[in-house]
Amino acid sequence: MLVGAAAANPITGGSGNPGSALTCYEVTVLVSNNAVYRPQLVDELVANAWGISLRPAGLGGHWWINNAASGTVTEYVGDVGTTPLFQDALKTVLVAQSPSLPDTPAEPTGIVFSGSDTDFVVSHAGPVYTAPSRFIFCTANGTISG
């Protein structure tokens, strides 16, 4: 699996005439689970990546990418042009499995950031806490979790 970016770069098609400019793309491989692609980061959990979401800059600015094959979401910081992609202490989140399928990986497919302090409130029994979910996940089997 590759996670990459492309940027437009006009070139002159060999004639030197700006009127014959072509548009081309420079591909930057940001993340892959295989070093053969020479990515900025090798992440073995990146497989069958589906959803992508961004936590806004004032809240950490992490890119969150679903990995359906591993039942995880991996987080990255940075971009293509100004800051090389890297991982900080927040690297991986395991997406909750469906209660009806406890032995099956979650297979996250969709993800959305929620900045609300009142919507999609979730609770946890041990340790006990209740808080709004910042990220909401959808899985291939229809489970919604946060």
Image: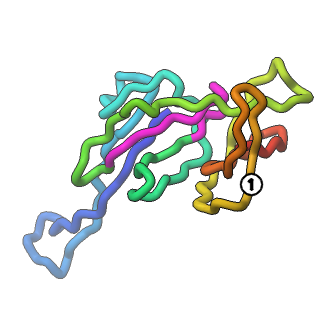
Q: Residue furthest front?
A: 128
Q: Name the colouring of the figure.
A: rainbow
Highlighted range, magenta: 66-78
Q: Nearer the viewer, residue 127 or 15?
A: 127
Q: Residue furthest bottom?
A: 19
Q: Position of residue 14 (x, y in %)?
A: 12, 64
| Element assignment for label 1 | loop
Residue labelled with disc 1: 120
Q: Amino acid at mark 1?
A: Phe
Does 36 appear above or below 132? above
Q: In this image, 6 relative to 98: left or right?
A: left
Does 113 appear above or below 62? below
For the point 45% across and 58% down, which residue is it?
Answer: 56
Q: Residue furthest top?
A: 103
Q: Position of residue 10 (x, y in %)?
A: 22, 68
Is residue 68 located in the magenta-colored stretch of the structure?
yes
Does 72 appear above or below 57? above
Residue 119, picture quadrant: bottom right
Does 56 appear above or below 133? below
Is residue 114 located in the magenta-colored stretch of the structure?
no
Q: In this image, 90 relative to 106: left or right?
A: left
Q: Position of residue 11 (x, y in %)?
A: 18, 66
